[in-house]
Image (cartoon, grey):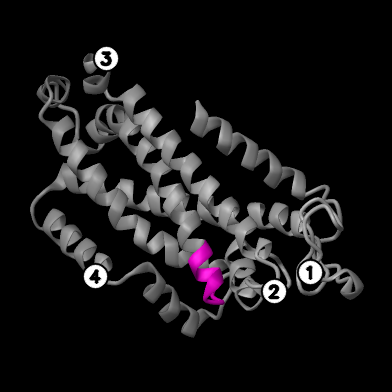
Amino acid sequence: MVGGGIIAFLVAVALLSLVWTPLPPAKMQIVHKLQPPLAFGVLGTDQFGRDILSMLMVGCWNSLSIAIAAVSMGGMLGSVAGVAAAAVRGPFEALLMRACDVVFALPPILSAMMLGAFLGPGRLTAIIAIASFMIPVFARVTLATALQAWSRDYVLAARAIGNSRFTISVRHVLPNIMSQIIVQVTIQLGLAVLTEAGLSFLGLGIAPPAPTWGRMLADAQTYLAVAPWLAILPGLAIALCVFGFNMLGDGLRDMLDPREANRR
């Protein structure tokens, strides 16, 4: 409930930023630059006089939208591949696992740098880079849980009455492993937010002047001694978002896992 409350609050802030912010996030007021919190605006201003609260609100939308899009893409493709591998087995399963090993050998940041060389920095680059790392994660989790489902009695009964592997996968296997996939989605959303912040910090995220939490951290490096709030505030936002998703994922795992329920 704590994790769900944090994420609900951040989603509300992100949606609110689409229709209202205290000031336009790109509006520069040099005369009010580097104002501390409450001196000008609730959370102060940056080196260009832009309102920090407005930038954090818009940055919340940018971070969450990229993370949700990337995890949705990676989760869908990875889950389909994992369920298919569990149904087909043989060379396809081995090939999928070797492909996952290759992707895991390349860190997401390095993959994004290579994609940025071809696609250029931007929202699409960040989404593809994060999704490409999520696909093998979901593929392995889904494959492991789907293989367990294929050994259950209800699957054996479905095979005995002549259902095809495709029908069994869609009607019996996938619904019974959906809870594990949902838990994995919430956990990977936190990792996606953190990865997006790292990409923006390196200049591979959304192009300026659109604010992102990662680029706010990068811009704050020069002013740590005179304006530490420029780094503290976006850092706290990233930490709160990742903490919320991790808490939500842990709570859902405890709620949906029968083994955890038996322990309680």
Tell me, yes or no, whether the highlighted magenta stretch contains residue 201: yes
Label 3 vs label 1, nearer the camera: 1
Q: Which residue, given by chain and number where applicable, does mark 4 sit on?
A: 105
**Mark nearer the N terminus (4 vs 3):** 4
Label 4: few (<14), some or many (≥20) within 10 Å?
few
The kind of residue on which mark 1 rests is Leu
Label 3 vs label 2, nearer the camera: 3
Q: Are marks 2 and 1 in contact (CB under 8 Å)?
A: no
**Mark nearer the N terminus (4 vs 2):** 4
**Looking at the image, residue 76 lies above or below residue 98:** above
**Mark nearer the N terminus (3 vs 1):** 1
Q: Which residues are magenta?
A: 197-204
In three-dimensional space, the C-alpha distance between marks 4 and 2, rounded to whole angstroms, equals: 31 Å
Label 2 vs label 1, nearer the camera: 1
Label 1: few (<14), some or many (≥20) within 10 Å?
many
Examine the image and state in which quarter residue 143 appears.
top left
The kind of residue on which mark 4 rests is Ala
Q: Which residue, given by chain and number where applicable, does mark 1 sit on?
A: 34
Q: Which of these two is toward me, 263 or 49?
A: 49
The kind of secondary structure element at disc 2 is loop
Examine the image and state in which quarter residue 8 appears.
top right
Residue 88 placement, left or right of 125: left
Q: Main secondary structure of the magenta part?
A: helix
Examine the image and state in which quarter residue 39 appears.
bottom right
The kind of residue on which mark 2 rests is Pro
The kind of secondary structure element at disc 4 is loop
In three-dimensional space, the C-alpha distance between marks 2 and 1, rounded to whole angstroms, equals: 19 Å
What is the x, y in percent for residue 246? Answer: 42, 41
